[in-house]
Image (tube, grey):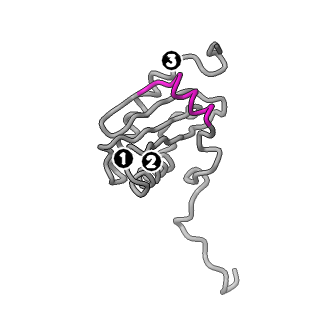
Amino acid sequence: MSPDTPEPSDDAPTPARTFKKRDRVHGHDSFDDVFAHGTRAASNAMLVLVTRNAANIARIGISVGRKYGDSPRRNRAKRLLREAFRLHRAQLDAGFDYVVVPRSEMPTDMESVAREFLRLATKATTTAARRPGPEQRPRP
């Protein structure tokens, strides 16, 4: 390496720790499918809905309405939930879409948000794993 080239840092993001477009639930139809057919797990802090996806990767969608608060509060909730998903994705089952709806009592610290998200996601995934996937679900 030349003296002008910076050394690679040890804290550079690894591929498993990045958050790319493919890791998100996109579009109205995808959200509607999860809301209509998803398995729910709820607490005072948040609602987590889970359904199988055909992509065989864990994906997250976040739905925060205006009722939750002003835009800085809504954006902070979304940032915390995205970060909890990104850091703990390896602990989630692949092949599921997770849609999270924060509630007014959602904590504002990362550790509590991550702990609650993982608890509810695991609870909902356990039930969703026994349900038919999107390819087996009858369409109206």
Marker disc for residue 124 = none
Indicate yes or no whether the magenta region holds residue 114: no
For disc 1, the marked residue is 113
Mark pair 1, 2: CA separation: 7 Å
Q: Are marks 1 and 2 in contact (CB under 8 Å)?
A: yes
Q: Which residues are magenta?
A: 28-40
Where does the image place residue 4, in percent across and percent down from the top left? 66, 85
Q: Residue at x 54, y 28 (%)?
A: 34
Where does the image place residue 70, in percent across and percent down from the top left? 39, 53
Secondary structure under the numbered disc 3 in the rendered image? loop
Q: Which of the marked residues, 1 or 3, is nearer the chain's N terminus?
A: 1
Q: Residues within 10 Å of mark 3 (few under 14, many from 20)?
A: few
For disc 3, the marked residue is 130
Compared to residue 136, the image places residue 12 above or below, namely below
For disc 2, the marked residue is 81
Q: Nearer the viewer, mark 3 or mark 2?
A: 2
